[in-house]
């Protein structure tokens, strides 16, 4: 799960990483009060899960109460690349001598943690990687050993930071690795990492993504989960514990297994349509889960047809069919449903479905013909 | 022949006394797998339908000669359970559990590589592996697979694997071994490990590979195929239409910064001479065609 900048900075601060003093505000009045407590000048920063905030006008320097009021009211409610700003972060303005980049993430090919450090901060790291890859100093960290002091010093030297930043950078990077490791982060990134004119090294921004599988040992991560931006559909699915991703099309998709669900979205697209969602109901496909899934999809006003794609493994076809019939008794569905049922005892399953078939409930033999039918029912090829 | 698992493999089930462990452990035994032991520190001396329970994997290995372990252990305890299995002396560790933190996976992957380089880890978050007609370790429905070869299957996705097994059986085509490597960021066994084993296995004449978005495992596999594989391969990569940045069910299935897209993976595989299908059905048909021309 991705954290907002302010959450990331609070996460950093809990590991002793120096961040500027700041406060989150959800209203103009709260923003003004925060600025007065912190002292002018302050920076007013839009809190959204996307880059390019500065260019969109979402980051402003304010020297007075009037300016904070003005900027906070401009930025709150602003749309940045489809993300609505609900929170601003009010932060003491920092003096910047130099801007660097630092991050830790998992290198999936090398199966080790990767640290990246660059003297060229404040710009997209992808751009640096394309145009001047030598400007990024990389280290690979054995998770058993961790990040040693010697390794950190060699790394900082290789990145050619200003010598005045060395001690501060070594200390901060070790704390950052601790936060990454002990905090079960998928990614921690500071861009820019700044050197101030008086020689301090601070995190001026934060990008943190935490592993949702680690919540069992970080119960306080529930609060980050609560602030995850989700549309109405995703909220409903999340409450039911369903693996759901909202998409833009008109064919609602239900499948068992993540791979099959991805594949179902693909074949809808190959049939000329567009899926409204990705939804994996897991291996079991019982009536309760199926009913919940159908409810979530039925509440999506864009959905014009529903494609249920189930492969029976250990869960036999007749159990799946009973689950679908049971679900339809619990939920009134507005859109026609196309079912493709294959695998263990698929024929028995189809026999159970057959008395229920109508213009609103159809069975197709193959994944491809079912996709074509669902797309046709949704109004044809896009 | 088969790879990694056959009728002689003796398997201990960590978590056999739990509901999932019992359900699949007994199913695996019914299939023909030598399920010789379970473990539970507080249930030593008890039995699960005649299968003895030991305190730990080491004791089970000593008493039964088990050489493999299969884990149905809750995610918080998987890290310790994997090391218990390696310390106990098995050479194959299969982790079915999903939801294991990525940092734990990176930790025990490296710990095994350093301390137990000959131990094979499969998973976490995988359906296990089946050598049809010989043994089945994990959650695959055994009856959807035809035994005997000539096809070997390696896959990151569970249901798409079942789909592949089933479609080949419909065409009367057998499978030597089907390995589900799982959908997590640090899989213990890679595509390349399986491809190399299939290349070396005389009974496997062709390989079917099922990938998905995220990471670069398929691209690395493509390079290996180009340089080392002589057997024909068909492949499918799920997630062509996946939006960037969204996790599609599997923790490993995420497209970031233009990397890890299905299109890039399919292109790399095609360039290495692999027959790539646009959907699972097409990949199955391509495999059937490859087998008919062997």
Image (tube, rainbow, N blue to C red):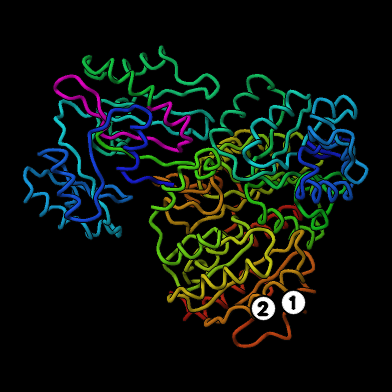
Q: Tell whether label 1 touches label 2 (CB within 8 Å).
A: yes
Q: Is residue B191 left or right of residue B67?
A: left
What residue would you read off at disc 1?
A350
* Mark 1 residue crowding within 10 angstroms, few (<14) / some (14–19) / many (20+): many
Residue A184 belongs to the span the image colors magenta: yes
For the C terminus of chain A, the quadrant is: bottom left
* Mark 2 residue crowding within 10 angstroms, few (<14) / some (14–19) / many (20+): many
Q: Residue furthest right?
A: B50
**Reading the chain from its start, which is encountered first: label 2 or label 1?**
1
User: Which span is picked out in magenta?
Assistant: A176-203
Q: Is residue A363 left or right of residue A98?
A: right
What residue would you read off at disc 2?
A363
Subunit that carries the residue with mark 2: A
Let me know if residue B148 appears in the view: no
Q: Is residue A276 left or right of residue B111?
A: left
SS of the residue at dot 1? helix
Residue at (87% x, 40% y) in the render: B35
Q: How many marks?
A: 2
Residue B13: x and y in percent read: 80, 39
Q: Nearer the viewer, residue B2 or A167?
A: A167
Subunit that carries the residue with mark 1: A
């Amino acid at each position: 799960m991705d954290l907002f900048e302010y959450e990331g900075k609070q996460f950093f601060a809990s590991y002793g990483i120096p961040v500027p003093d700041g406060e989150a505000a959800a209203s103009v009045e709260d923003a003004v009060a925060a600025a007065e407590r912190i002292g002018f000048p302050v920076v007013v920063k839009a809190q959204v899960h996307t880059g390019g905030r500065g260019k969109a006008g979402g980051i402003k320097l304010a020297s007075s109460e009037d300016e904070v009021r003005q900027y906070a009211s401009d930025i709150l409610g602003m749309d940045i690349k489809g993300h609505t700003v609900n929170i601003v972060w009010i932060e003491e303005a920092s003096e910047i001598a130099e801007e660097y980049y630092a991050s830790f993430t998992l290198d999936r090919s090398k199966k080790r943690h990767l640290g990246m450090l660059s003297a060229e901060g404040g710009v997209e790291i992808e751009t640096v990687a394309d145009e001047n890859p030598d400007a990024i100093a990389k280290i690979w960290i054995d998770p058993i050993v961790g990040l040693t002091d010697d390794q950190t010093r060699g790394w900082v030297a290789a990145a050619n930071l200003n010598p005045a930043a060395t001690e501060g950078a070594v200390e901060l990077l070790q704390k950052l690795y601790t936060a990454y490791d002990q905090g079960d982060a998928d990614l921690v990134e500071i861009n820019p990492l700044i050197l101030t004119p008086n020689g301090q090294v601070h995190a001026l921004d934060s990008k943190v993504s935490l592993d949702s599988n680690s919540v069992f040992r970080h119960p306080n991560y529930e609060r980050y989960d609560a602030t995850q931006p989700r549309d109405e559909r995703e909220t409903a699915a999340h409450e039911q514990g369903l693996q759901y991703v909202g998409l833009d099309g008109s064919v609602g998709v239900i499948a068992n297994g993540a791979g099959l669900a991805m594949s179902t979205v693909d074949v809808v697209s190959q049939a000329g349509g567009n899926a409204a969602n990705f939804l994996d109901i897991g291996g079991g496909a019982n009536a309760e889960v199926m009913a919940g899934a159908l409810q979530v999809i039925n509440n999506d006003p864009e959905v014009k047809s529903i494609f249920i794609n189930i492969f029976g493994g250990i869960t036999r076809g007749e159990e799946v069919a009973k689950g679908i019939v049971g679900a339809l008794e619990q939920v009134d569905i507005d859109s026609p449903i196309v079912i493709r049922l294959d695998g263990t005892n698929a024929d028995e399953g189809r026999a159970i479905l057959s008395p229920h078939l109508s213009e609103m409930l159809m069975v197709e033999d193959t994944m491809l013909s079912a996709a074509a039918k669902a797309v046709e029912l949704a109004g044809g090829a896009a | 022949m088969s790879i990694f698992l056959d009728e002689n493999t003796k398997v201990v089930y960590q978590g056999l006394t739990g509901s999932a462990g019992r359900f699949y452990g007994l199913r695996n035994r019914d299939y023909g797998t030598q399920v010789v032991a379970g473990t539970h520190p507080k249930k030593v001396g008890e039995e699960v339908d005649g299968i003895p329970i030991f305190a730990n994997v080491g004791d089970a290995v000593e008493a039964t000669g088990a050489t493999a372990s299969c884990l149905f252990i809750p995610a918080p305890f998987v890290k310790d359970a994997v090391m218990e299995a390696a310390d106990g002396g098995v050479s194959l560790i299969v982790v079915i559990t999903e939801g294991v933190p990525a940092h734990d996976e990176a930790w025990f992957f490296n710990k095994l590589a350093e301390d137990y380089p000959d131990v094979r880890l499969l998973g976490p978050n995988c359906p296990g592996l089946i050598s049809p007609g010989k043994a089945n370790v994990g959650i695959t429905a055994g009856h959807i697979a035809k035994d005997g070869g000539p096809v070997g299957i390696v896959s990151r996705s569970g249901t798409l694997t079942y789909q592949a097994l089933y479609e080949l059986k419909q065409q009367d085509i057998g499978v030597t071994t089907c390995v589900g490597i799982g959908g997590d960021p640090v899989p213990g066994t890679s595509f390349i490990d399986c491809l190399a084993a299939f290349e070396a296995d005389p009974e496997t004449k062709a390989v079917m590979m099922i990938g998905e978005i995220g990471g670069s495992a398929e691209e690395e596999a493509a390079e290996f195929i180009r340089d080392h594989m002589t057997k024909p391969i068909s492949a499918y990569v799920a997630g062509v239409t996946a939006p960037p940045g969204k996790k599609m069910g599997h923790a490993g299935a995420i497209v970031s910064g233009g990397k890890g897209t299905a299109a890039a993976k399919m292109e790399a595989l095609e360039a290495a001479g692999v027959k790539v299908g646009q959907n699972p059905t097409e990949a199955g048909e391509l495999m059937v065609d490859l087998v008919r021309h062997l």
